[in-house]
């Protein structure tokens, strides 16, 4: 069987060396690479990415292949940024990466261009020949040292691989003299990693919840990989994840993986160092390098976990240590609450471990839950989650079906962005203070404060805030999940407007162009430049909100182009009438209504924005309108007065009439007297 | 109490002083006084009736009195610049048509009192109507220029409601 596998490997290696024939359709990436969707490279497939033949248009002698990532999974953009075009010893060179339309997905997706490993994959399946040579010098120089260098090179860049396992090893050259670690970018950290190659803590996490971890996690996986390569098979393959985890907890990783297997004597020290469950005891890169240089260190004696003489009976199983009990609680969530609330647990903690501090903390958690929550289900969740943290502080955060390291919260949110139930649970983990508690138990005040900021973001229902904001805040690598642009894989803010322009050609204009995902994506990626416009966007006044939307898109077009957005302007034009109507002057409105369609056809949002939001004009309009309102009110008052049919008005008119009559009569008398006097004397 | 007594004393002394001055003058100007009393009889009657009436507007005696006096003046001048005796005063008043003219002028005064206010009232009402139409035209112009919002009080609900109802247009 092993022999068959070797021949299959050879067949597949020859497929890599064969010249490209019948290329068929071509997909272009950055006008630099040609990718052939009809020429798959099955031997180089990754669990979450398919490999295809590719070639570089300008450099013909370098052989490359393409890994087409799944559009629904977040890729590790930090690796792309740091490693693109950079050759590193021990790591398959990432030549370039970019987004291109992939016909089978009917959408754009991330495509990674790697240097073609001419020797193919080191192992194809779970069963294979012994890969590591017997001779120690060759073993170290050809395998251990270059692979360790790969981990070290990533560590120097502040990166972790997290996909270190035997089937992710490749021969870089056709002669199979150079080995390198394969891809780790196409899926979230540790997503495809079997629990055999993961630490106890990481094995407790769900696939997306392992987080980037630390270099020590890579070294652990390196140790487990060496076990498999040394034996020629995975010694724990027959165990389920749960069984393996339980075995690791009880016996320690080294004993669990090695078991009764015969390991070369020289490797025992290295494997004990790399597979140490206690991170502080695990060998780091320099210790491993010292070993490779021939300096032999004192073998590590694995420290057994603190266990009690008295058992704690839970779900008909006896538990003797905190870690196993916490794991059991997390797996039997509905039964755990009663066990924790009973006095038996506290008695076991105090008598079995003489640990009054933990007992008091559990009591405090119960009291805290009673104070914070009125619903029993929520109280139970809080009590179980906190008790699990107290009993096993190194374990991931566990909350019902969620189990993840806090640094993987972003990945979890991204992966379950379209799963409403899971998203609610994850938001609850942040909002209800579970995550805060986790950091509290790890004495990480800075992170706890950061969680408080997250809680503020979650509490705001505005556009650009809430769960969506958190999603993009925590996932720099995530493409915008808005249904409007999801097929265009917009992971960079500069690609948003072209994507919306494309969408505008097919979408119904009744659809609002700025949904919660787009608003949050802009808020995170465009930063402070969008802050003012977002405030306007969330105004209760419709026209102010529309103005905010226009300002945001206008700023994006100004900053990143393209110069013309004909279709999008037509779409947004549908939503601009409140801005036009916001002007009080009918004449101004008519001018705007007359000229706006022509301006929309020009495709320039900044021009439209300037045209509709002339601050001087708006100020004058407002001032004159206020004056007109006052004038109207004054006229209304006078009309009301004149319209009065009351006796008072009649009486006033009569008084005036009497006064006129009196003046007239007396005037006549005075005139008569004057006339007579004048006629007498002159 | 003391001040009331002092005030009544002052009124008494003022009345006494007036009487002391006017009473000798009455004898000195007796013809004029008699002629005046006879001529202004309608005015006195109107004045007395108006004083005793409940109406607050006491313009009737002014109208009647004004024209009554105007009618009496030519004859009074005739008396003053002619033979200014009591006999002459009675003769002028009764022997000629003077009293008819004087009383007729008083009657005209009454007519003026009766009709001028009504005419003025009608005129004012017509003026009000014209002003009303003018003001309404101004308001219509303001609405034509600024829309119906100009007529709203500062009630944001009305403005928002108005805008919502009219925001269905588009320019695409």
Image (spheres, coloured by chain):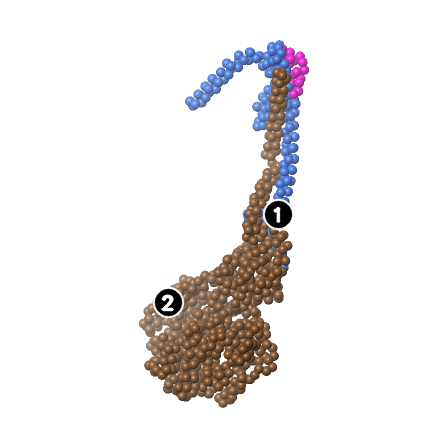
Chain colours: A brown, B blue
Decide whether the magenta segment is chiefly helix, strand or loop. helix
Residue A100 magenta-drawn?
A: no
Judging from the image, mark 1 belongs to the subunit labelled B
**Residue at figure coordinates x 64%, y 25% from the top left:** B112
Quarter residue A276 falls in: bottom left
In the shown orientation, is residue A40 left or right of residue A404?
right
Q: Which residues are magenta?
A: B88-105
Q: Which dot marks residue A248? A: none
Q: Label 2: which residue?
A: A443
Q: Nearer the viewer, residue A185 or B57?
A: A185
- Assess disc 2: are there few (<14), some (14-19) or many (≥20) residues with their C-alpha within 10 Å of its C-alpha: few
Judging from the image, mark 2 belongs to the subunit labelled A
In the shown orientation, is residue A662 left or right of residue A323?
right
Q: Residue A458, relative to residue A652: is it above or below?
A: below
**Element type at mark 1:** helix
Direction right: furthest residue: B97
Q: Nearer the viewer, residue A126 or A565?
A: A565
Q: Position of residue A119 (x, y in %)?
A: 50, 84
Q: Same chain, marks 2 and 1?
A: no
Q: Position of residue A282 (x, y in %)?
A: 37, 77
**Residue at figure coordinates x 54%, y 78% from the top left:** A59
Quarter residue B69 falls in: top right
Q: Nearer the viewer, residue B23 or A358?
A: B23
Q: Are marks 2 and 1 in contact (CB under 8 Å)?
A: no
Q: Position of residue A207 (x, y in %)?
A: 47, 74
**Residue at figure coordinates x 41%, y 88% from the top left:** A134
Q: Nearer the viewer, mark 2 or mark 1?
A: 1
Q: In the rendered image, is residue A623 in sight? A: yes
Q: Which dot marks residue B145? A: 1
Q: In the rendered image, is residue A366 in sight? A: no
């Amino acid at each position: 069987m092993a022999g068959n596998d070797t021949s299959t490997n050879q067949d597949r290696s020859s497929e890599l060396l064969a010249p490209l024939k019948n290329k068929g359709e071509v997909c272009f990436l950055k006008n630099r690479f040609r990718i052939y969707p009809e020429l798959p490279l099955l031997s180089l497939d990754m669990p979450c990415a398919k490999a295809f033949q590719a070639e570089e248009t300008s450099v013909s002698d370098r052989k490359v292949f393409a890994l087409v990532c799944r559009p629904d999974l977040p890729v590790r953009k930090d690796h792309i940024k740091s490693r693109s075009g950079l050759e590193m010893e021990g790591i398959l060179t990432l030549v370039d990466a970019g987004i291109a339309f992939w016909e089978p997905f009917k959408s754009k997706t991330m495509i990674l261009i790697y240097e073609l490993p001419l020797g193919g994959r080191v192992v194809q399946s779970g069963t294979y020949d012994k890969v590591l040579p017997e001779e120690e010098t060759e073993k170290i120089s050809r395998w251990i040292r270059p692979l360790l260098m790969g981990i070290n090179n990533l560590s120097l860049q502040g990166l972790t691989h997290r996909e270190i396992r035997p089937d992710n090893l490749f021969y870089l050259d056709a002669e199979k003299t150079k080995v390198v670690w394969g891809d780790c970018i196409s899926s979230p950290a540790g997503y495809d990693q079997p629990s055999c190659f993961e630490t106890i803590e990481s094995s407790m996490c769900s696939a997306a919840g392992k987080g980037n971890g630390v270099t020590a996690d890579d070294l652990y996986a390196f140790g487990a990989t060496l076990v498999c390569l040394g034996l020629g098979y995975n010694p724990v393959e027959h165990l389920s994840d749960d069984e393996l985890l339980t075995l690791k907890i009880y016996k320690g990783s080294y004993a669990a993986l090695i078991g009764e297997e015969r390991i070369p004597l020289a490797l025992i020290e290295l494997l004990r160092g790399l597979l140490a469950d206690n991170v502080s005891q695990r060998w780091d890169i320099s210790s491993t390098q010292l070993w490779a240089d021939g300096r032999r260190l004192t073998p590590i004696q694995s420290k057994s976990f603190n266990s009690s003489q008295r058992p704690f009976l839970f779900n008909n199983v006896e538990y003797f240590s905190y870690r196993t009990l916490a794991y059991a609680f997390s797996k039997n969530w509905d039964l755990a609450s009663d066990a924790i609330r009973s006095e038996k647990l506290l008695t076991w903690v105090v008598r079995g471990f003489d640990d009054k501090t933990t007992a008091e903390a559990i009591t405090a958690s119960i009291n805290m839950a009673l104070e914070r929550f009125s619903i029993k289900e929520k109280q139970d969740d809080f009590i179980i989650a906190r008790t699990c943290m107290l009993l096993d502080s190194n374990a991931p955060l566990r909350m019902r079906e969620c189990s993840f390291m806090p640094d993987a919260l972003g990945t979890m949110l991204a992966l379950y962005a379209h799963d409403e139930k899971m998203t609610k649970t994850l938001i609850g983990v942040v909002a209800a203070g579970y995550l805060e508690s986790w950091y509290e138990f790890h004495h990480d005040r800075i992170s706890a404060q950061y969680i408080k900021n997250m809680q503020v973001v979650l509490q705001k229902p505005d556009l650009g805030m809430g769960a969506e904001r958190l999603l993009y805040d925590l996932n720099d690598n995530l493409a915008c999940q808005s249904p409007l642009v999801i097929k265009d894989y917009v992971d960079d803010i500069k690609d948003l407007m072209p994507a919306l322009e494309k969408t505008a050609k097919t979408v119904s204009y009744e659809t609002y162009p700025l949904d919660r995902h787009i608003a949050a994506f802009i808020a995170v990626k465009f930063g402070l430049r969008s802050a003012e416009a977002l405030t306007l966007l969330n105004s209760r006044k419709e026209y102010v909100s529309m103005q905010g939307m226009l300002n945001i898109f206008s700023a994006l077009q100004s900053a990143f182009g393209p110069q013309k957005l004909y279709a999008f302007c037509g779409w947004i034009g549908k939503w601009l009438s409140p801005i036009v109507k916001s002007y009080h002057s009918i004449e101004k409105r008519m001018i705007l209504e007359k000229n706006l369609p022509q301006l929309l056809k020009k495709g320039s949002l900044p021009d439209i924005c300037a045209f509709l939001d002339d601050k001087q004009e708006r100020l004058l309009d407002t001032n004159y309108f206020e004056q007109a309102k006052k004038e109207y009110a004054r006229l209304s008052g006078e009309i009301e007065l004149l319209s009065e049919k009351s006796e008072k008005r009649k009486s006033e008119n009569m008084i005036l009439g009497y006064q006129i009559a009196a003046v007239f009569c007396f005037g006549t008398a005075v005139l008569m007297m004057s006339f007579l006097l004048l006629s007498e004397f002159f | 109490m003391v001040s009331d007594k002092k005030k009544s004393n002052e009124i008494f002394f003022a009345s006494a002083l007036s009487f002391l001055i006017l009473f000798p003058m009455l004898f000195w100007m007796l013809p004029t006084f008699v002629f005046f009393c006879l001529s202004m009889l309608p005015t006195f009657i109107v004045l007395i009736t108006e004083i005793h009436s409940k109406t607050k507007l006491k313009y009737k005696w002014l109208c009647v009195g004004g024209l009554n006096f105007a009618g009496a003046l030519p004859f009074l001048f005739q008396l003053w610049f002619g033979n200014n005796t009591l006999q002459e005063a009675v003769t002028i008043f009764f022997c000629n048509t003077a009293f008819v003219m004087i009383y007729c002028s008083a009657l005209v005064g009454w007519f003026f009192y009766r009709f001028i206010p009504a005419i003025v009232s009608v005129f004012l009402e017509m003026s009000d109507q014209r002003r009303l139409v003018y003001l309404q035209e101004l308001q219509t112009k303001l609405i034509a220029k600024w829309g119906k919002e100009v007529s709203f009080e500062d009630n944001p609900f009305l403005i928002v409601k108005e805008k919502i109802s009219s925001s269905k247009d588009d320019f695409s």
